[in-house]
Image (spheres, rainbow, N blue to C red):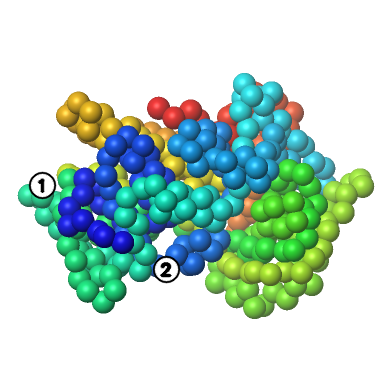
Amino acid sequence: MSVPARTTVAIIGAGPAGLLLARLLQRSGIDSVVLEHRDRAYVEQRQRAGILEQGTIDVLRACGAGERMDREGLPHNGVELRFDRRGHRIDFPSLTGGRAVMVYAQTEMVKDLVALQLAEGGPLLFEARAVAVEGLEAGQPSVRYVHEGREHTLACDFVVGCDGFHGIARAAVPSGVLRTFDREYPFSWLGILADVPPSSDELIYAHSERGFALLSMRTPTVSRLYLQVPNGTDPGDWPDERIWDELDLRFAVDGDWKLERGPITSKSVTPMRSFVTEPMRYGPLFLAGDAAHIVPPTGAKGLNLAVADVVVLARALARWHETGAADLLDAYSDTCLRRVWRAEHFSYFMTTTLHPDPAQSDFDTRLQLSQLHRIADSETAAAELAQNYVGLPFE
């Protein structure tokens, strides 16, 4: 693939944010180059989120990336909150004016966007490791990267860091410019993939004295389940039978319901944290997705926040490209951060309401249960949860 020495937008990272941004820019007539330090197989196989908000669904359809999602994805019109051995369903459409979510694995979304980019878009380089972002202060940005054993320099008008929490983009901002806010949680998630049809048609969020559990899915034949575990847990300490036994206990409910078991094909432990960087822009450098913010996965917001970031940025770049106006670019950070902090709060609420803290008292547990009962009993409280879960409209 021939790669120009200059482009309008240099995108670091071929995750959902970087790939979707490239797609949106291409449809606006703006050229870009995407640099990804991993190989294609790795990018298309890494397990991440699986819940798409209504706004994310709409954007993928609008940019021509929704055909397989609509064919293979699983529309979900609600979730179940399970506590005190009872289940309480939250119906999304009736509480949100018809909005819902879609279960469609991030891996599949990435595969769709990679295929479109390679077929119709600008250069997408795998195994291209960005090593430096330069020229930001002078307004002449460039990205130095290594590809096929040689170092190259890509000059550009804008750099977009979609390279995750540990990427180089945020680190390129001079010391003292950014302010960060973070919270570490005293527990992690042990996540599994299992070759067994889901035991429920919709997600189940379970609160129990033994800890939180989540029943999700990837396809009609593949289940995705999670257990709250102590930080530092080794997945190897959890044989398959122990996992299924613990899930049974945490999902226990009065009535006729059974957790189906099957072969576990993958186990991993994910620490829980919240993180926000302010601002999300430094001159011609823009941060998006995990490079700028992280949420605990309880609220299903991480992937969707990344999508919201690049939708805002793509609109701003399109306006600049068409008119020369930079007002939307100048507003990018403030616009995104309003949504980021709303999602951070919702994710914090879901996490602290559903997970027993190892150090909490019986009083704290009663407060959690009181909040869960309010959601189950109050249409107003249920609507607040539903509206945040399906995603606020894009600004």
**Residue beneath label 1, please?**
139
Residue 208 point in image, percent of width and height: 74, 53
* Residue 87 vertical position relative to residue 206 in the rendered view, above or below: above
Structural crowding at the residue carrying mark 1, measured as other residues with C-alpha within 10 Å and reported as few (<14), some (14–19) or many (≥20): some
Residue at the (44%, 42%) spot, across then down:
307
2 vs 1, front mark: 2
Answer left or right for 155 relative to 186.
left
Toward the viewer: 213 or 96? 96
Q: Which residue appears at 27% of the width and 64% of the height? A: 130
Q: Which secondary structure, mark 2? A: loop
Inspect the image, locate mark 1, and give the three-letter code of the amino acid beneath it: Gly
Residue positioned 60% across, 61% down in the render? 189
Near mark 2 (Cα within 10 A), the count class, few <14, some 14-19 or many ≥20, is: few
Give me the residue at 85% from left, 49% from top. 253
The vertical placement of 258 against 376, above or below, is: below
Q: Residue 192 in the image: state x and y as whole percent.
A: 67, 64
- Quadrant placement of the N terminus: bottom left
Contact flag, marks 2 and 1 (Cβ < 8 Å): no
Which residue is denoted by mark 2 in the rendering? 39
Label 1 secondary element: loop
Q: Establish if 248 lies above or below 88.
A: below
Determine whether 14 is above or below 203 in the image: below
At which x and y percent is residue 247?
Answer: 76, 60
The amino acid beneath tag 2 is Asp
Left or right: 351 as drawn, with respect to 160: right
